[in-house]
Image: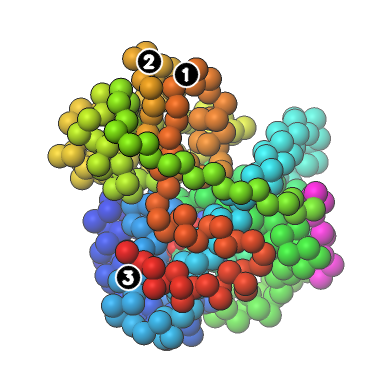
Amino acid sequence: MNNHKIIPTREAGLERLKAFLPSAGKNYAAFRNYDLGQEKHFNVSMLSPYIRHRVLTETEVLKSVLQSHSQKSAEKFIQEIFWRTYWKGWLEMRPTVWAEYCSNLNKLYDQLQTQSGLRRSWEDACSGNTGIDCFDSWAKELFEIGYLHNHSRMWFASIWIHTLELPWELGADFFLRHLLDADPASNTLSWRWVGGAQTIGKTYMASAQNIQKFTKGRFYPRNLSRTPKMIQSSNNPDRLPISFDAVPDNPKNYAILLHWEDMDWSGLKDLLPNAKKIFCLVPNNEPKPLIASNLQQNFRKKLVDDSLMRWQKNFGSVKFIENLEALKSDAFDSIFTNYITVGHTRDFIQNFDWGSTKLIKIAHDYDRRTWPHATHGFFRFKDQIGNFLLALN
Ligand SMILES: Cc1cc2nc3c(=O)[nH]c(=O)nc-3n(C[C@H](O)[C@H](O)[C@H](O)COP(=O)(O)OP(=O)(O)OC[C@H]3O[C@@H](n4cnc5c(N)ncnc54)[C@H](O)[C@@H]3O)c2cc1C
């Protein structure tokens, strides 16, 4: 398989998983931190764009790994999957962190209009023209293929915040517009972690020695800051309970709303035969404040097409919508959809006036079981992994 090309189909995701499985054990544990360069990410799975959109589910990836390895030998890989789960649960219970990020970002975009120095530094960083060769190379890689190795994401964010002294929200936004796996939880919370807002007072500082070691000598950046530039943000908010909707018995006069955020539509299957209509919300490319890269937009659109093709025999005809007005036309009693996690799509759906129609969001068992455990740090959450694995179905 052409390792670096991320093809927007489930079949390609499954092929990638199959090819990666033999390496998911000790090999991954030993080599996962090395970034050998674009087109050479053989030591990590590159499954995130599929998992992010639930074209592959965490459950099926974990089960496949456990069929090839013991839990112990695949411990590191399994933990990484649960890092994703942890971030999702953490943000679900603290949605104001996302709201604060969006509000700060809007203010920063205003400042970019009036502060030419800030604008120039931001443009140089986004276009890979800072003169810091590793950073510039990662900016270009992100731009070209929509993927970066985890270690390079950490170094990139660290240089952005601590050396270039740019606002972290602009960096998180740059990632969110370009990554094929762009995810409001993993992205926002990882950037906050690098800047010292997630684990309060603990920043991540990239060092030349570490970069040299884990890029196998490709880079040795001089003049990286050693002084943390702690990001300003409110304290971590108290957590709120996650509200999981119950499915009513014998619902009538309802429609189904499919969306691209979570394309594992299996939880809606039993509702399909009696649905009056089926809608599919396609990615909305309105500026937020800037639009996503063409690469990301096309990737998502093609994933939706691929998912609909696979599900076609269950669905019959599907009406594509970019806004929600069409859902009002038939005065449905309720609309069923997959649970929508914190992020732009959730904001868009929550801000809509639903009138008397009830939106019922169906969460997967995996999410119901795991997210409420993201109460404190990852290390406490990690203690539950054995139980989570036992409950996979
Ligand atoms: C600043 C920054 C921003 C990030 N933004 C995103 C993002 O928008 N979307 C995203 O999916 N991940 C994000 N990550 C996490 C991580 O970098 C990617 O998930 C990982 O690099 C994806 O590559 P992979 O599939 O080859 O990972 P592998 O190493 O093969 O890991 C397997 C899977 O585990 C999950 N995973 C691995 N590492 C992490 C992690 N640190 N946090 C959460 N999940 C993880 C992913 O689903 C991944 O596909 C970010 C990390 C940092 C430091």
Please name the amino acid that badge 3 sits on: Lys
Circle 3 is placed at which residue position?
Answer: 63
Percent position of residue 245, x then y: 46, 41
- Label 3 and label 1: CA atoms lie apart by 41 Å
Instruction: Pick whichever, 186 or 175, lies toward us.
Output: 186
Q: Name the mark nearer the viewer: 3 or 2.
A: 2
- Label 2 and label 1: CA atoms lie apart by 8 Å
Is the residue under label 2 in contact with that under label 3 (CB below 8 Å)?
A: no
Q: Is residue 120 above or below residue 151?
A: above
Q: Secondary structure at mark 1?
A: loop
Q: Earlier in the sequence, mark 3 or mark 2?
A: 3
Percent position of residue 180, x then y: 45, 50
Residue at x 75%, y 30% (from the top left corner): 110
Circle 2 is placed at which residue position?
Answer: 331
Dominant secondary-structure state across the stretch colored magenta: loop
- What's the magenta region? 226-234
Q: Which mark is residue 356?
A: 1
Is the residue under label 1 in contact with that under label 2 (CB below 8 Å)?
A: yes
Q: Earlier in the sequence, mark 2 or mark 1?
A: 2
Please name the amino acid that badge 1 sits on: Ser
Q: Name the mark nearer the viewer: 3 or 1.
A: 1
Q: Is residue 265 above or below residue 136?
A: above
